[in-house]
Amino acid sequence: METVVSGIRPTGKLHLGNYFGAVKNFLKMQKEYNCYFFIADYHSLTTHPTPGDLHGNVKQVLAEYLACGLDPEAATIYIQSDVPEVAELTLLMNMNAYLGELERTTSFKDKARKQPENVNAGLLTYPVLMAADILIHRAAKVPVGKDQEQNLEMTRKFAGRFNRIYNQEYFNIPQSFNYGEELVKIPGLDGSGKMGKSEGNGLYLADDEKTIRKKVMKAVTDQGPTEPNSVMPEPVRNLYTLLEVVSTPDTVEYFTEKFNSCEIRYGDLKKQLAEDIVKFNAPLRERILDISADAAYLQKVVNMGKEKAQASAAKTVKEVREIIGFKPF
Ligand code: TRP
């Protein structure tokens, strides 16, 4: 079975866009591949060297993914910093990563611009740490979004270079991977494209009923159609896209007809949408709360993940050491 590796940033809570994107992918992949999913807490230090509540953030993200159905029996779910072998592989890979290529990566340049007071070496070598995450399990596939493609390209470069330098086909050259075409793109509530973390745009799985209603009622619309069967403007189409995800086909049809005959009242549409999102979220939210409160379960999951991930990581580091030429006396 092919190995898949993916890292999860321990920042922010999951929103519906994440749920119908990355999370859905993970749920499929864990059944079909040998999956390693980890929370990238080392990485988070590159931008937040003194995080307010590192542990709390990691715990929240872990609880949310578990609540969505990530299965610690099927996949290896672990915390990056629980596997310090990753740090050793990073150090070894750093010897064959060049300053010029690291400085040229888009994400480094972006972050250096955003945090000019903290252009640290970790930021520069972020792609090396990410390569170590992937190569430590000798992954064949990595599910990445557009924003991570360049980092994965760097991983391929480092893997190929290692193989060439030490004259061995040791690392797989990992391929990017997604079920992209099958996924619905979840729009935001502010009239723009994708659901994200920005203010007034995202609906979080952990949001309570009142918050969901308030956000949906504030969603951007317009004055309404003036001619039958007119083209839906983007903000309105976005609400229908959300409706299609959380409501019944009958409901979608009802409101589509109302739009097409110019009888639509956006207030009614939003009320229905809010109720259906509340219904959709309720069981997830409850599970998030239950799991977050279950310290013993979380500890069990983390320990199990650590053990499985460490077994795989230690084997790679041992072999890499041998390949490079470290020998016991
Ligand atoms: N850089 C990724 C992100 O920002 C997170 C990440 C770290 C990752 N290591 C990884 C993703 C390894 C895939 C594989 O989202």
Image: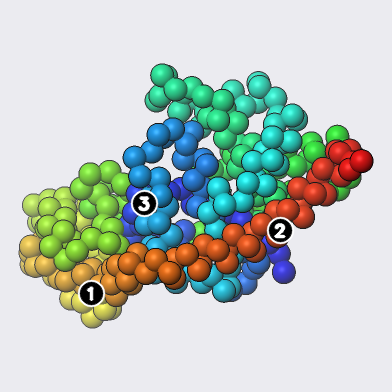
Disc 3 marks a residue whose amino acid type is Gly
- What is the secondary structure assignment of the residue under circle 1? helix
Which of discs 3 and 1 lies nearer the camera? The answer is 3
Counting residues from the N terminus, which is met first, the one under dot 2 or under dot 3? 3
**Three-letter residue code for mark 2:** Ser
Asked whether 87 or 113 is in front, the reply is 87
- Sequence-wise, which precedes: disc 1 or disc 2? 1
Q: Which mark is residue 56?
A: 3
Q: Name the image quarter holding the C terminus.
A: top right
Q: In the image, what residue occupies the spot 51% across and 40% down?
A: 43
Q: Is mark 1 within 8 Å of ligand 1?
A: no
For residue 213, above or below residue 122: below
Q: Earlier in the sequence, mark 3 or mark 1?
A: 3
Q: Name the residue type under label 1.
A: Lys
Could you say which is closer to the camera, residue 55 or residue 96? 55
Question: Residue 310 — which label?
Answer: none
Labels 1, 2: front one:
2
Res 281 visible: yes
* Residue for point 50% across, 68% down: 300
Q: Badge 2, how many Cα within 10 Å: few under 14, some, many 20+?
A: some
Residue bearing the label numbered 2:
312
Q: Position of residue 133 (x, y in %)?
A: 63, 47
Q: Quadrant of the N terminus?
A: bottom right
